[in-house]
Amino acid sequence: MASKSTDIPPVCDYEGSDYQQRFWEQGGRAYEDGAEAVALRHLLPKAGGEMLLEIGAGAGRNTPRYQGYRKVVLLDYSRTQLRQAQARLGRSDRYVYVAANAYTMPFVDGLFDGATMIRTLHHMAEPLRVLRETRRVMRRDGIFILEFANKRNLKAILRWLARRQQWSPFTPEPVEFAPLNYDFHPKQVFAWLQEAGFTVEDIRTVSHFRIGLLKRTIPTRVLVALDALAQPTGRWWQLTPSVFVRARAQGEPAAAQPEAFFRCPQCGHAPLEQAEDRLVCAGCGAHWAVRDGIYDFKAPLD
């Protein structure tokens, strides 16, 4: 982890994983990918912005969809995923690759005017904590696109009514269906967003037709088109396995230091001093590696 603090929650680490290839490219999820692209197209600001933070960027599957932003910072806990993102996107001034813990992000306050967190919150044991950290690094009125796994989906409701699952889809607490894999109740997520300093502006329900038989028998483009028609109903009810939210940052975080970008995730000092192959914290003396174009804040150098 990128902090010596003993109270940092456990992190789901995709180090060494072939998740992008196994789950997306070979997993029969073209429909889900297309439906998510539709949701992002409708929720992202039309004019874009200066700099977007992609939390849980993985191998960069969604990164090309953020064309409205001049710079995109890809943050993931897995160096493996970031190297795959580099291979997909290349190295340029537009992309910054950062290996770090989302609970203790290595950025100064109020740095980003946009942020996304897609298929990431469901790995968070302390969702409110990571949402507060997201708000810390965002500017006032910045747009945050959040996706979460919905506990109160239609399949879960039917299984519960048929007594085929023990947990209720209607209670507010998260359900951990596998280690560090959580489903959340929509009202609880909306409450967390408000508590963290966001105002919900729009909601889209996604993956209405995530059923194997439908995906095998109906062309993907047709399913995506049908999903696009159904997504706006998320403003009134949320019964799909995936829910997308557009929220706006409220309040005023501490002003970012001029020209400052990184801060030490171990002690909070900023700015960090640039050396040839590392960043150095003058506050606590920690050294953070810069390897092959990736800023590595998972653990300080010895």
Image (spheres, rainbow, N blue to C red):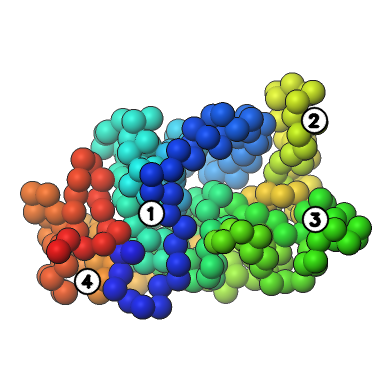
- Spatial distance from mark 3 to mark 4, Cα to Cα? 45 Å
- Spatial distance from mark 2 to mark 1, Cα to Cα? 34 Å
Q: Which residue is mark 3?
A: 156
Question: Which amino acid type is marked by label 1?
Answer: Tyr
**Element type at mark 4:** loop
- Spatial distance from mark 1 to mark 3, Cα to Cα? 30 Å
Which residue lies at the image location 35% right of the left edge and 43% below the top edge?
80
Q: Which residue is mark 4?
A: 269
Taking depth in this image into account, of 158 and 204 the one nearest to the observer is 158
Query: Does 194 appear above or below 279?
Result: below
Which corner quadrant of the image does residue 63 belong to?
top left
Q: Earlier in the sequence, mark 1 or mark 4?
A: 1
Q: Residue furthest left?
A: 276
Question: Which amino acid type is marked by label 3?
Answer: Ala
Question: What label sits on residue 77 in the rendered view?
Answer: 1
Q: Is residue 247 visible?
A: no
Which residue lies at the image location 77% right of the left edge and 59% below the top edge?
152
Q: Earlier in the sequence, mark 4 or mark 2?
A: 2
**Element type at mark 3:** helix
- Tag 3: Cα neighbours inside 10 Å, few (<14), some, or many (≥20)? many
Q: Earlier in the sequence, mark 3 or mark 2?
A: 3
Question: Which amino acid type is marked by label 4?
Answer: His
Residue 61, percent across and down? 48, 36
Taking depth in this image into account, of 232 and 242 the one nearest to the observer is 242
Question: Which amino acid type is marked by label 2?
Answer: Leu
Which residue lies at the image location 33% right of the left edge and 47% below the top edge?
79
Q: Earlier in the sequence, mark 2 or mark 1?
A: 1
Q: Which residue is mark 2?
A: 214
Q: 136 left or right of 247?
A: left
Which residue lies at the image location 62% right of the left edge and 55% below the top edge?
148
